[in-house]
Image (spheres, coloured by chain):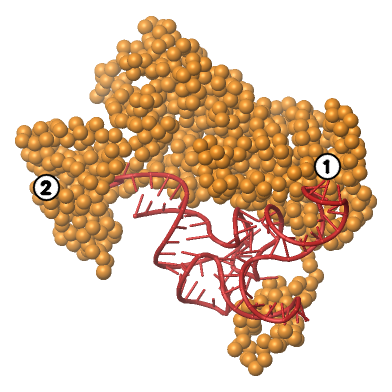
Chain colours: A orange, B red
Amino acid sequence: MRKQYPFDLIESRRQRLWEETKAFQAWNPGQEIPAEHPFALRHALSGPVPASQLPPKYYILDMFPYPSGAGLHVGHPEGYTATDILARYKRARGFNVLHPMGWDAFGLPAEQYAIKTGQHPRVTTEANIHNFKRQIQSLGFSYDWSREVDTTDPGYFQWTQWIFLRLYGSWYNPKTRRAEPIDSLPIPESMDDASERDAYVDQHRLAFVAEAPVNWCPELGTVLANEEVVDGKSEVGGFPVVRKPMRQWMLRITAFAEKLLEGLDDIEWSDSLKEMQRNWIGRSEGAEVTFEAAESGSQITVFTTRPDTLFGATYMVLAPEHALVDELVSAEQREEVAAYREQASRKSDLERTELAKDKTGVFIGAHAINPVNQERIPVWIADYVLATYGTGAIMAVPAHDARDLAFAEKFQLPVIKVVQAPEGQDSIGFTGAGTSVNSGFLNGLPTDEAKETMIQWLEAQQCGRRQINYKLRDWLFSRQRFWGEPFPILWKDGQHQAVPEAELPVLPPSLKDYKPTADGEPPLARATDWLKHEQGAKRETNTMPQWAGSCWYYLRYIDASNANYFCDPEAESYWMGTRAEGATPGVDLYVGGTEHAVLHLLYARFWHKVLHDLGLTSCSEPFYKLVNQGLILGEDGQKMSKSRGNVVNPDDIVSAYGADAFRLYEMFMGPLEMSKPWNTKGVEGVYRFLGRVWRLIVDEESEVAMEQEISLDASRAEASLSLLKLHRSISGTAEPSAEQLKVLHQCIKKVTEDLEAMRFNTAISAMMVFVNEATNWEVRPLSCLRSFLVLLQPFAPHLAEELHGLLTGQNHEVIAYHPWPAYDEAHLVEKTLSMPVQINGKLRDRVEVALDADREAIQAMVLASEKVRSYLDGKEIKKLIVVPGKLVNLVVK
RNA sequence: GCCGGUGUGGCGAAAUUGGCAGACGCACAAGACUUAAAAUCUUGCGAGGAUUAAACCUCAUGUCGGUUCGAGUCCGACCACCGGUACCA
């Protein structure tokens, strides 16, 4: 395809201008703003400006990428383009826009590369960042690069470690429902022993150590969070994962389950995303019921969401790992129970899931007494009951629970109906709401009331209580890896303590070998000198998971170069919106992929809430509005992947069609949230559109002259742009006609409304309509074209600014801060309307009517129409509907 | 299984509050320009029928039904695909 316009010359020269003028720097309160900066000129500001006098803020954030060796994928720039367009639009609307970018650069690939080659992960990481940055910058995004962050930079992770110490030094106070400094934790007076008191304190920290069954991945030599295990395999690499008890750092996210749930009501996220988070947190209301063991008299507590079915409990099941099993098991059953427990412990999660349909279990030779009717019911262990949820024990009501029913059928346990299903449905196996039967004092009550009555009864009898449970588990926060943030923790005499703040950052040691040690210790344990601290203390050898750095990066952007504090409170309250009336609390818009729907977004919200409780952030939710971009598929409609060979490299598109065409195509493909296939022919379409914009403004002969000049001396290619002249139809003096104003203002209106609603694809089509029209104009009023270029600027910034310079003669002007054109409804009104006439709902004719014509006038026009009359022949008009400004419908018979 | 989303021409899509289905673009076809091609410009382009031609008629937004003067849009049932989740009591 022949080059439509010299995009290569234009794009490099515009990008250089933006860099030289620091065009996209965002201004913090009190920061010195140079008088000649385009932002200063637009807002008539200069020097240090307090928050109260800065324009309203707009914080627009992309999910920062992991800089992989493969380079940028076309999926990345989709979100980045959308946010860039909005950032540029908001600047034109007069906002002070914060639009930063950085690198989530800790992670496994660099470490595994290091294990293979001995190359320090720092080296790989830096090379990858360099490549990512080059690719991102080639697309002309208006990031404020002075705020670039890199999670692996000691100047960054110093503060990640610092925030960890805040978690370590806090507890959750259920009375105030807030995180508070650990000093405020009331210690029971009965504890006089110092070590007992310490242990009590440690049990309440938000960052704590626990010996817990963890997901151990032998292949990766590390533990994984529940969220990183997919179908019993590691999310990264797909290696088998087994459960193994280990000493680990945990974060008490469960304490915030309710607040994380409640916070969703205050933010603008898609319903599906909120639903995913709600499901992940998994709140369920019910009751704990305590049964007495018939033989030993010990108490066994179960959790149920259906206390109304307590009369239907025919047996009880404990998780194989349940602590009471050893105590309850009878002598005869001991051997069989031990064998089952052994077998269950060796099963991976995958095996447990695969066998989900075929229930297994063993009777332990003990019985429990049902508190409502004193029935003796057998106690079993089975791995369909999870040790980690509720109390690790259930009462089984096979008549009204599918899992219990399957188990009861297999082991021939009794089934008692206690809920009457609605008419026409089988009560056995019915799990919905019905009416209680065979249930003593509950008989006749609908399920809702029966639950409530039973809970009150249990509480009165002191054998149970109302209880809310969450699926959410505490966050397993340590990894046995090298390439992550070291914990700022020391161990001495088996007791942990914080590294003094003055010693932060704790840097990782230098190693030759990045593998875990032979006896399973993390790689940091190899650094024998590094381990040693004063007075015999030793350093923690675990590192933090990759999520740590991304939990707070949006705060660091606000004050990225602050060496003394994680984020200046003054700047924080300005950008996080709590300073000005009407400003959005938190990041105004956050765009990224669905793959982070639960993990990153839940963790970051958790950290933010802790920081907020501790008075370190001013708002309670970090991301006010969040949009997920859809997946970009390959040309074959399949997910892009190296193995399918359908990966499109942005570099190739940029070199063939330019960054502007690339940006425009990514937005023209369809709605941002949808997944949609790539089609390079489609890029050519928008590329042709940009060519038409070029030819609308540039004189063809002067372009030929420029090309000749370039062919003579390629080194002066960029300078020869100055040979370009305006198209001869362009007039700086001609008044635009009413028709021309209408076309322009329709375009302004549509683009403005579509940008507000993030409908980029239709905004682009509106601009195409304008260009198609304007190409036919014999006289092209300069003012119309200039307004159009301001509209085009967010989408195709290089071309728009270059042509704007040609129109105005101001070649070195950054137009990013030019005011957004306003549309005037006066130019849009039509005098007449071609009104559709339907007969029985089918379009049959149209009549020209005055816009302000009344019902009678329209009716007369319609009935006068030859065509309409031909349909009325011999028929009766039953009804005549006139929708003013829309259409007419006649119902005839 | 459960939760969420999406089904519209050959393709990507539009139709914002129930009011002209298919804007805009791709692909394709014809024409202009050209020695020719590319590029560009013009025109056509849901399917079927009718006509010398045009006007015209019928059908059509996953399927079936409903509400309404009028349904891509609202309601009910179902089908397909995509994403999440899965023994969470």
Q: Which residue is mark 2?
A: A377
User: What residue is shown at x 91% (from left), y 41% (from top)?
Assistant: A702
Q: Is residue A867 left or right of residue A597?
A: right
CB contact under 8 Å: marks 1 and 2: no
Per the model, the C-alpha gap separating discs 1 and 2 is 84 Å
Q: Is residue A551 left or right of residue A742?
A: left
Q: Which mark is residue A831?
A: none
- Depth check, mark 1 against mark 2: the one in front is 1
Circle 1 sits on which residue?
A804
Q: Quadrant of the C terminus of chain A?
A: bottom right
Instruction: Identify residue type, mark 2.
Output: Ile
Between A858 and A339, the residue placed more toward the observer is A339
Q: Is residue A87 left or right of residue A469?
A: right
Mark 1 chain: A
Residue depicted at x 6% and y 33%: A331
User: What's under tag 1, amino acid-wise?
Assistant: His
SS for dot 1: helix
Tell me if I can see residue A177 in this picture: no
In front of the other: A216 or A293: A216
- Tell me the residue at 22%/62% (across/down): A427
Q: Residue furthest right?
A: A733
> How far across and down, in percent of the image, does residue A727 sit?
90, 47
Eyeballing the image, is A247 above or below A634? above
Query: Is disc 2 placed on a helix, strand or loop?
Result: strand
The image quadrant that residue A739 belongs to is bottom right
Which quadrant of the view contains residue A540?
Answer: top left
Label 2: how many residues lie within 10 Å, few (<14), some (14-19) or many (20+)? some
Residue drawn at point x = 70 percent, y = 84 percent: A868
Coordinates of residue A297 in the picture (x, y in percent): 10, 38
Q: Percent position (x, y) of residue A355?
A: 26, 43
